[in-house]
């Protein structure tokens, strides 16, 4: 009896619930018809049966690579360029939550929880289950906030975050709660930004080349506090407040005593509370109308412990012509949440060469394509 109660308590714990994969509330075939987009936009399936699809990367030949929160990495070739993947190819398995993927010089970089690996000349080896080279293997192996989002910056450095191993705590090691960068060969690791609870998405402004990143706010301060964040990091060495200050001005009840919000970098934009913003991107293409160019699109994965769920959508943050100021925050695509139940959870975005936009979904095991027809 005690054993059954213990197991039940684990299953109902907040941490367990945070990582529970919900089943679709509506049939996926009917789901896309419920997605609301601005006039002129359409959404379709680029690929289905892509289990736990997370970060996306584009190869030189147009193949899309998909990281996951499971143990596999996928390739989605679209050889006839019809806007749909020809097949779903498993290029690697048995990995440790290979969430992050990035391309450089024909090599696919994959970020597991504890290391970064590299598959050279991946386009020629899609079905060969190639053996990777280890780029860096000294990342912490903590599962809590352990999903790695990776990308190469304008400085050719590989950026990788290390989230806090907790809901809220002071870092037990300097690397926790940070965004880091290293050379492409894994050397020269350095901390770029501190005070970052858990970012699983960042990009660089096409205008200023400065990094912007999403950050997930802490839990257990109520339904509406604190906000999640969109941050701008114009230089290295900034501290964004965690665990002392949340949302730019909310002192943490345990760790905020004696701290001053002015000592930390405030968000460029406060987002919804507990919406879990993930793989943001600046839209730089020409297919969408001009008002979307150089603007930020953010997949909101959705709240897991709020009384009334929010998120489960893609939002648009408008940025002024200088590329330095966020001026508005609005919904771009919604409908993955129906009557309080979700059938999909957007994770990451990828702009294709034709200007259409891919969206990964780790609940509906899919990758969507959003295009503008006018």
Image (cartoon, rainbow, N blue to C red):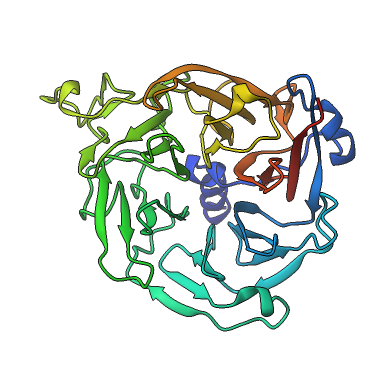
Q: Name the spot of residue 265 as percent of width and height, x first.
A: 24, 29
How many labels sit on residues? 0
Residue 90 to residue 143: above or below: below
Q: Nearer the viewer, residue 105 or 25?
A: 105
Q: Residue at x 84, y 40 (%)?
A: 28
Answer yes or no: is residue 228 visible.
yes
Q: Nearer the viewer, residue 310 or 136?
A: 136
Residue 365 to residue 207: above or below: below
Q: Name the spot of residue 269 as percent of width and height, x first.
A: 41, 22
Left or right of 191: which side holds 365? Answer: right
Answer yes or no: is residue 309 visible.
no
Q: Name the spot of residue 150 as percent of width and height, x first.
A: 46, 55
Left or right of 79: which side holds 56? Answer: left
Left or right of 210: which side holds 273? Answer: right
Q: Nearer the viewer, residue 318 or 145?
A: 318
Left or right of 40: which side holds 159? Answer: left
Q: Nearer the viewer, residue 17 or 213?
A: 213
Q: Residue at x 27, y 63 (%)?
A: 189
Residue extending furthest toward the left:
258
In the rendered image, which quarter contains the C terminus? top right
Q: Residue at x 81, y 45 (%)?
A: 45
Q: Residue at x 71, y 40 (%)?
A: 356
Q: Name the spot of residue 31 as percent of width and height, x first.
A: 83, 34
């Amino acid at each position: 009896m005690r054993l059954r109660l213990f197991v039940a308590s684990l299953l109902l714990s907040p941490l367990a619930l945070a990582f529970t994969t919900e089943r679709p509330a509506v049939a996926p075939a009917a789901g896309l018809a419920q997605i609301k987009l601005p006039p002129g936009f359409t959404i379709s399936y680029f690929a289905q049966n892509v289990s736990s699809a997370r970060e996306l990367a584009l190869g030189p030949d147009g193949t899309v690579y998909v990281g996951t929160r499971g143990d596999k990495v996928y390739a989605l070739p679209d050889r006839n360029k019809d806007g749909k993947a020809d097949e779903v190819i498993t290029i690697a398995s048995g990995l440790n939550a290979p969430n992050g993927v990035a391309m450089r010089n024909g090599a696919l970089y994959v970020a597991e929880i504890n290391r970064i690996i590299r598959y050279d000349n991946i386009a020629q080896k899609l079905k060969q289950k190639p053996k990777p080279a280890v780029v860096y293997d000294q990342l912490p192996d903590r599962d809590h906030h352990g999903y790695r989002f990776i990308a190469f910056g304008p400085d050719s450095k590989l950026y990788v975050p290390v989230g806090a191993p907790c809901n809220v705590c002071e870092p037990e090691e300097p690397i926790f709660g940070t965004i880091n960068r290293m050379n492409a060969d894994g050397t020269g690791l350095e901390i770029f930004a501190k005070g970052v609870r858990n970012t699983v998405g960042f990009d660089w402004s096409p205008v200023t080349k400065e990094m912007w990143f999403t950050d997930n706010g802490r839990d257990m301060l109520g339904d509406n506090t604190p906000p999640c964040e969109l941050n701008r990091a114009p230089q290295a060495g900034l501290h964004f407040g965690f665990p002392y200050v949340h949302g730019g001005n909310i002192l943490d009840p345990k760790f905020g005593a004696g701290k001053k919000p002015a000592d930390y970098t405030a968000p460029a934009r406060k987002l919804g509370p507990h919406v879990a913003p993930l793989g943001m991107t600046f839209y730089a293409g020409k297919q969408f109308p001009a008002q979307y160019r150089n603007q930020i699109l953010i997949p909101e994965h959705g709240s897991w412990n709020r009384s009334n769920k929010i998120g489960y959508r893609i939002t648009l943050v408008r940025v002024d012509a200088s590329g330095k100021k966020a001026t508005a925050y609005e919904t771009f695509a919604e409908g993955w949440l129906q009557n309080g139940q979700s059938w999909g959870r957007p994770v990451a975005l990828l702009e294709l060469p034709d200007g259409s936009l891919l969206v990964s979904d780790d609940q509906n095991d899919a990758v969507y394509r959003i295009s503008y027809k006018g």
